Structures are given as structure tokens and as C-alpha cells.
């Protein structure tokens, strides 16, 4: 069976510090991978998605970047965090090249920038 | 526009059926409709999806209008554990894009 791991679960970082959130998927090959962010009391905002190694599409220009160094690894980064980067970050995957398959989410990382 | 329109909130009583509506008037012929739900402090959970025909699974039923411009998620007997935010999502574009855009969803409250 497929599983998705996301860490850390919670993170408190000062403004201006770097960020690295990691997501890995097990039990599947060449998944489509996604990063979403959810601000407090808001819906989910799609940040990045990837259909393969090294292929990253950005939905919202901002202070964040994403990378996919391996097939089942997706990393969200920032060089300098802003207060507005606080939120609940969710990684998700789905089967490749198919819009008839569910999206599977990790448990999320709650980031507080102070 | 890949967005859908849902009521901000709804309320139901335990053990009663719940009908959660969603409008997707600009949907394309090959776009699927997905439903997810999110409990507090958790990632969204897949509920059901469909294209044209009504769909049933162990969690819920999905009724899609004949013109596909709207759909309804049906919870047959609401329980307290069904209290969550429910998202209706148009699966926007197949092929290389494969992205799902979430709206603000419907907050379902279930009263005992």
C-alpha cells in the first residue's frame, strides 16, 4: 500500500530564517506531487506541483521554492521566511497522468513564523 | 476558471441525511468532480469522485446533474464524526497539468 510521510509536524521559525520541509511517498512510482498551504481559517492554496524528477510548476509567485531531487521526494524551501509564510503546509500525491484518481494528503506541517 | 461554488456552512442533525451542494457551471466535458473533507488539524481526506453518473461508496453518494453544472454530496446518516469542512473540486485539466484547485469549502456542523 502507498503511504506519504511529511515532517516535521510542527515548526516554529524566526523571520528571516531558512525553511526546509520534506515529503516522501512510498509504495508507488512516478507520482504527481503537490504542495498546498492553508492559512488559519482559510481554504487550501496550491503552491507547487510536479509530474517528475526536476519538473516543478509554481502556482503562486512568492517567497518559497520546491524541488524534487528523487522520484518520491518533494521538498519545500525558503531562504528567508516572512511572517506571512505561517500556515499549515500539506504535501499530497496522486497516480501519474490521471485525473481519475484521488489525491492523498500527508498529515501536514504547522509552521509558525515569529 | 477552475473554481467551484459551495455554501460557507451547513448544519445537520445526527442520524439524518445531509445534502451538500456544489456549483461548477464552467466545467468542461472531461473534468471530474472530486469531494474531500478535512477534519481540524488534519490533511484533507478523499471522499468520492465522478464524471457523469451518480456514484456510491462506503462513505457517501455523489449525485451529478444531467448538465454537469452542479453536484450534490450525500451523507446518508450524519454522525458527529462527519463534522468537517467539505471541499468540492473540479479536476482541472488532464494530461500534464493534473492539478486540483481547492475553494473554501462548506463547514458542516452535526448536532447530536
Image (spheres, coloured by chain):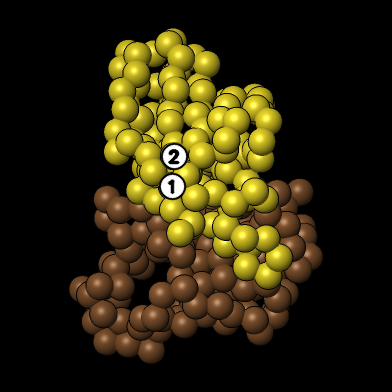
Chain colours: A brown, B yellow
Q: Residue at x 54, y 49 (%)?
A: B27
- Ranked by sequence position, the earlier of labels 1 and 2 is 1
Q: Quadrant of residue A4?
A: bottom right
| Mark 1 surroundings: few (<14), some (14-19) or many (≥20) residues within 10 A | many
How far apart in space, not on screen, are marks 1 and 2 (Cα)?
6 Å
Where is residue B68 drawn, in percent x and y?
57, 38
Tag 1 residue: B4
Above or below residue A100? Residue A85 is: below
| Mark 2 surroundings: few (<14), some (14-19) or many (≥20) residues within 10 A | many
Q: Residue B8: in sight, yes or no? A: yes
Which dot marks residue B23?
Answer: 2
Q: Chain of mark 2?
A: B
Which dot marks residue B105?
Answer: none
Above or below residue A101? Residue A32 is: below
Residue at the far front: name it: B67
Q: Residue at x 31, y 81 (%)?
A: A81
Amino acid at each position: 500500500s502507498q503511504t506519504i510521510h511529511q515532517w516535521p509536524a510542527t515548526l516554529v521559525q524566526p523571520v528571516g530564517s531558512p525553511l526546509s520541509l520534506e515529503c516522501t511517498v512510498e509504495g508507488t512510482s512516478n507520482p504527481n506531487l503537490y504542495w498546498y498551504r492553508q492559512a488559519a481559517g482559510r481554504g487550501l492554496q496550491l503552491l507547487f506541483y510536479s509530474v517528475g524528477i526536476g519538473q516543478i510548476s509554481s502556482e503562486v509567485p512568492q517567497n518559497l521554492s520546491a524541488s524534487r531531487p528523487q522520484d518520491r521526494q518533494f521538498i519545500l524551501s525558503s531562504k528567508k521566511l516572512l511572517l506571512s509564510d505561517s500556515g499549515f503546509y500539506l504535501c499530497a500525491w496522486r497516480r501519474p497522468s490521471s485525473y481519475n484518481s484521488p489525491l492523498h494528503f500527508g498529515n501536514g506541517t504547522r509552521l509558525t513564523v515569529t | 476558471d477552475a473554481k467551484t461554488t459551495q455554501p460557507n456552512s451547513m448544519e445537520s442533525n445526527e442520524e439524518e441525511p445531509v445534502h451538500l451542494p456544489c456549483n461548477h457551471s464552467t466545467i468542461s466535458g472531461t473534468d471530474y468532480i472530486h469531494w474531500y473533507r478535512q477534519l481540524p488539524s488534519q490533511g484533507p481526506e478523499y471522499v468520492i469522485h465522478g464524471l457523469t453518473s451518480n456514484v456510491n461508496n462506503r462513505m457517501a453518494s455523489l449525485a451529478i446533474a444531467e448538465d454537469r453544472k452542479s453536484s450534490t454530496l450525500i451523507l446518508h446518516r450524519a454522525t458527529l464524526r462527519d463534522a468537517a469542512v467539505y471541499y468540492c473540486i473540479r479536476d482541472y485539466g488532464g494530461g500534464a497539468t493534473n492539478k486540483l484547485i481547492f475553494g473554501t469549502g462548506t463547514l458542516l456542523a452535526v448536532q447530536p
